[in-house]
Image (tube, helix red, strand yellow):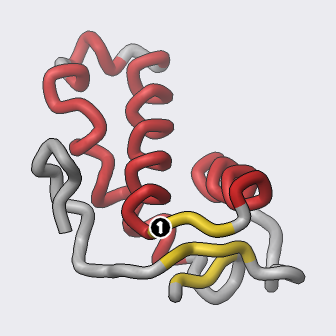
Amino acid sequence: MRTARGQRTGNVTGDVYALAPSARLPVTDSEEFLAALLAKEKRLPYEKVLLSLADSLYRRELRAGGWAADVGVFGRRLFLAEARRVVERAKGELWEVG
């Protein structure tokens, strides 16, 4: 699947939603970001979750000085793979995809 800008988000379709109760608490900043996002939005398309987290990771890296390493040239697409790993790693524990 690709975004409007042609960025690959993967082949997974469906929505992501928080599990209540969850099997564990979020342990990383990325998990906390997604848990808060899903608490607010309840259910979001997989692609939107990946893009939202990739944006968050991108902004975090820029604040940490990533601008000096040309992170800005690549934009959020540089973080899509990490966003996908975060979502898949906590699937079935903090949220579900379906």
Q: What residue would you read off at disc 1? A: 45
Tally of numbered tags:
1
Eyeballing the image, is 8 above or below 68? Answer: below
Q: Position of residue 21 (x, y in %)?
A: 88, 82
Q: Amino acid at mark 1?
A: Pro
Q: Position of residue 1 (x, y in %)?
A: 19, 69
Residue in view at x 45 percent, y 26 percent: 59
Residue in view at x 30 percent, y 53 percent: 80
Side (left or right) of 8 relative to 63: left
Side (left or right) of 11 relative to 22: left
Eyeballing the image, is 25 above or below 62? Answer: below
Residue in view at x 65 percent, y 74 percent: 17
- Label 1 Cα crowd, 10 Å radius (few <14 / some 14-19 / many 20+): some
Eyeballing the image, is 63 above or below 92? Answer: above
Q: Position of residue 38 (x, y in %)?
A: 69, 60
Is residue 27 visible in the rendered image? The answer is no
Residue in front for this viewpoint, 4 or 72: 4
Residue in view at x 40 percent, y 45 percent: 54
